[in-house]
Image (tube, rainbow, N blue to C red):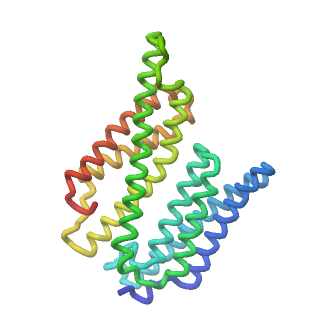
């Protein structure tokens, strides 16, 4: 049972609603830019968006401190996901934060229009259902979110890796002047754009899947000593390595000298690591999956 003292306070709930409102203002300003792309609207998008992330993170820290205090100075017996407030708020802030980060580094038209409302809905749900103990939720919905985002992200990143391999083949043919009959692989520019789009969509999803998987594993370990999370398992090491490689691939447009073949090589390396991760998950199932 949840300790009543660890439930969200009125102040925490109100601050979470303020975070949701900030995300709503950011999304509204982003949509309004389609008609008038003014400097004020651009500033509003980022100030309101990142302000919402800061407020959400502050609430999570505040709630964690309160919950740990209710279990003693060491916080023994408390873990994230003990209540709907904590679990739903974590998901909402992570999803909104990832969308804003992607729009900042590698914009995808309309991404924040669709993703921020999801984050807002999760924050509102956290405020509404924050005092209910998620008995089944802790073991089903969270794990579903983990699997959907992890496998969805892996799918998009796999596409990026495959397209990266296609880019290398097309680039090799172009350099060797073996262009009779066409390459059948599309232009280098088109392949690079497709790979970058796949990384842009897949990396945030995979980030959420990785974070939720680790938290879920820690939670299971706290509930059952037979489910202790091993952070040096092959599947976790491979997943983290793949995440790092694709993070570098996501940021290659910042450095013009690192685009093209080098970015494609990174995507291909990430593909190998991603395949290794999926194999490790299937054939080395020790610990929580």
**Residue 193: where, in percent of width, then height?**
55, 34
User: How many marks are shown on the rendered structure?
Assistant: 0
Q: Residue at x 57, y 85 (%)?
A: 10
Whether 62 is drawn above or below 31: the answer is below
Name the spot of residue 218 as percent of width and height, x first.
31, 67
Residue 58: x percent and y percent?
Answer: 55, 70
Nearest the camera: 18 or 68? Answer: 18
Q: Residue at x 43, y 28 (%)?
A: 166
- For the C terminus, give its image quadrant: bottom left
Q: Residue at (22%, 61%) from the top-left corner?
A: 287
Q: Quadrant of the N terminus?
A: bottom left
Q: Is residue 165 above or below residue 27?
A: above
Query: From where the camera sits, is residue 68 visible?
Result: no
The picture places residue 97, in percent across and down from the top left corner, at: 55, 58
* Residue 96 seen anywhere in this rendered image of the structure: yes
Above or below 249: residue 287 = below
- Name the residue furthest bottom: 4
Furthest residue in direction front, as rendered: 181
Residue depicted at 42% across the width and 56% down the height: 149
On the rendered structure, is 254 left or right of 161?
A: right
Name the image quarter holding residue 170.
top left
Examine the image and state in which quarter residue 23 appears: bottom right
Apparent side of residue 101 relative to residue 39 in the rendered image (left or right): left
Q: Is residue 76 left or right of residue 260?
A: left
């Amino acid at each position: 049972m949840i300790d009543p003292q660890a439930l969200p306070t009125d102040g925490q709930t109100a601050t979470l609603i303020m975070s949701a409102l900030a995300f709503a203002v950011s999304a509204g300003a982003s949509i309004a830019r389609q008609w008038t792309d003014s400097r004020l609207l651009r500033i509003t998008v980022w100030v309101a968006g990142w302000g919402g992330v800061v407020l959400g993170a502050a609430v999570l820290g505040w709630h964690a401190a309160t919950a740990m205090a209710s279990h003693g100075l060491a916080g023994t017996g408390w873990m994230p996901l003990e209540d709907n407030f904590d679990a739903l708020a974590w998901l909402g802030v992570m999803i909104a934060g990832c969308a804003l980060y992607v729009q900042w580094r590698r914009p995808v038209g309309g991404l924040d229009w669709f993703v921020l409302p999801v984050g807002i809905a999760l924050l509102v749900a956290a405020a509404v259902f924050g005092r209910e103990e998620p008995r089944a939720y802790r073991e089903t919905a969270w794990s579903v979110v983990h699997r959907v985002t992890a496998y969805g992200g892996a799918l998009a990143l796999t596409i990026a890796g495959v397209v990266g391999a296609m880019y290398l083949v097309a680039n090799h043919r172009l350099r060797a002047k073996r262009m009779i009959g066409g390459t059948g692989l599309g232009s280098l520019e088109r392949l690079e754009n497709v790979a970058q789009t796949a990384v842009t969509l897949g990396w945030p999803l995979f980030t959420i899947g990785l974070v939720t998987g680790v938290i879920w594993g820690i939670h299971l370990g706290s509930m059952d000593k037979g489910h202790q999370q091993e952070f040096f398992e092959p599947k976790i090491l491979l997943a983290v390595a793949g995440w790092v490689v694709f993070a570098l691939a996501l940021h290659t447009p910042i450095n013009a000298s690192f685009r093209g073949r080098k970015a494609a090589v990174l995507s291909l390396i990430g593909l190998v690591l991603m395949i290794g991760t999926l194999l490790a998950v299937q054939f080395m199932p020790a610990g929580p999956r």
